[in-house]
Structures are given as C-alpha cells and as structure tokens.
Amino acid sequence: FTLVTAFEPIGCLAGDADGLAELLARATPLAARGAAVVLAGWGPPERCATTSVLRVATKLADPLRSAGSWRPALRDDLEEVAQRAGLRPDGSGRVACPFGYADTGSAVRGLLSTGLFDAAIAATDEEQVDKELTEALHPHQRADGTVWMPNVFRYLIARTP
C-alpha cells in the first residue's frame, strides 16, 4: 500500500489514541517504505464550536468516567500516535470541518450516532441526554432552524519507515 488513512478522529474519547496507535503499528509493515499515513483529529477546543456540545457527554457521564468518556483534543495527540506507531511526521495542518444539520432533532440524532454520548446515556438515560443536548445546541441554531457549528480539525501526514 502507498497510502494509509485513519478516519477516526483522535481526541474524542479518553484512550482513543491507544487503539489507533496499535492498529497503525500492525498496518505499517503492509505499507510500502515511505508511504503516507494521514491522521485526523479534533483541533483546539476553542476553535471547535462542537466542544461545548460534547461537554454535555462528559458532564452527564462523570459518575462513570471511563475510556468511553469524551475529552478535548490535546495539542500533540496526532504526533504521539504517529511516534508510538513508528511513523515519521512529514507535515501537518488544519482544515475547516463545520457540522451542519437541518434542525435540532437532526443534530441530536447525528451527535448521538457517534457513540460519544453512550456513557452519558448509561449514567442517566436517553431522555435526559436528549434534553441537555438540545439545550446545548440552542446557541448554534440559526433563525431558519438549521444548526451550524464551525470546527477546525488537525491533520498529520506521516511516513512509514
């Protein structure tokens, strides 16, 4: 293979980088020498409108704080995963990744489908999570009813040894 891409954003769940590093370490021997490996992750929390909404998951799941709890991205998440997988960083950057939904109901369903709220649902119930998620989305609702959350994601291009 000459290109490996990881579509699971790093910096969503506590411990998410661990599993990805192991997966990449297993995939690296299958790739050609110098093949590009592209990693993506959440950008700085202050540049991601969705951060305030994802904090609902942490707040509600706090009694069950576990590997399934949301956490904000850290500055060097991508670089640390690449290093643990034996990859050599070759460039990085940021890209706009807005989340847009037709209405609040669609936003709630879309966000719940990510699995980031599973621990919160287990700690409370889906009705409570829906209610608090709807409230957290209110500042992102436009006059026409759509929900718009601008976000910045980071990417890292690394090379296999």
Image (cartoon, grey):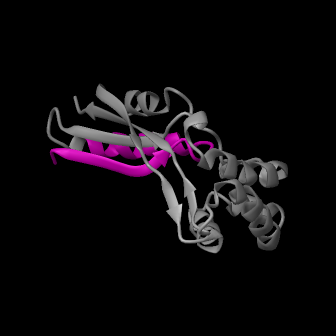
- Seen from the viewer's position, the closer of residues 107 and 34 is 107
Residue 29 vertical placement versus 105 (above, below): above
Residue 46 vertical placement versus 151 (above, below): above
Q: Is residue 126 left or right of residue 3?
A: right
Q: Is residue 140 left or right of residue 59?
A: left
Q: Which residue is depicted at the point 57% across and 46% down?
A: 12
Q: Which residue is depicted at the point 73% across and 64% down?
A: 134
- Seen from the viewer's position, the closer of residues 54 and 101 is 101
Q: Residue 142's x, y, as percent? A: 61, 61
The reply to whether the magenta stretch includes residue 100 is: no
Q: Is residue 23 left or right of residue 1?
A: right
Q: Is residue 153 visible?
A: yes
Residue 148 vertical placement versus 87 (above, below): below
Q: Is residue 86 visible?
A: no
The reply to whether the magenta stretch includes residue 4 is: yes
Q: Residue 60's x, y, as percent? A: 81, 55
Q: Which residue is depicted at the point 68% across and 63% down?
A: 118
Q: Residue 46's x, y, as percent? A: 60, 34
Q: How many marks?
A: 0
- Seen from the viewer's position, the closer of residues 32 and 119 is 119
Q: Is residue 149 left or right of residue 134?
A: left
Residue 22 vertical placement versus 112 (above, below): above
Q: Which residue is depicted at the point 73% across and 61% down?
A: 133
Query: Dividing the image into 4 quarters, which one contains the C terminus?
Result: top left
Instruction: Look at the image and give the residue range highlighted in magenta.
Output: 1-28
Q: Residue 63's x, y, as percent? A: 85, 50
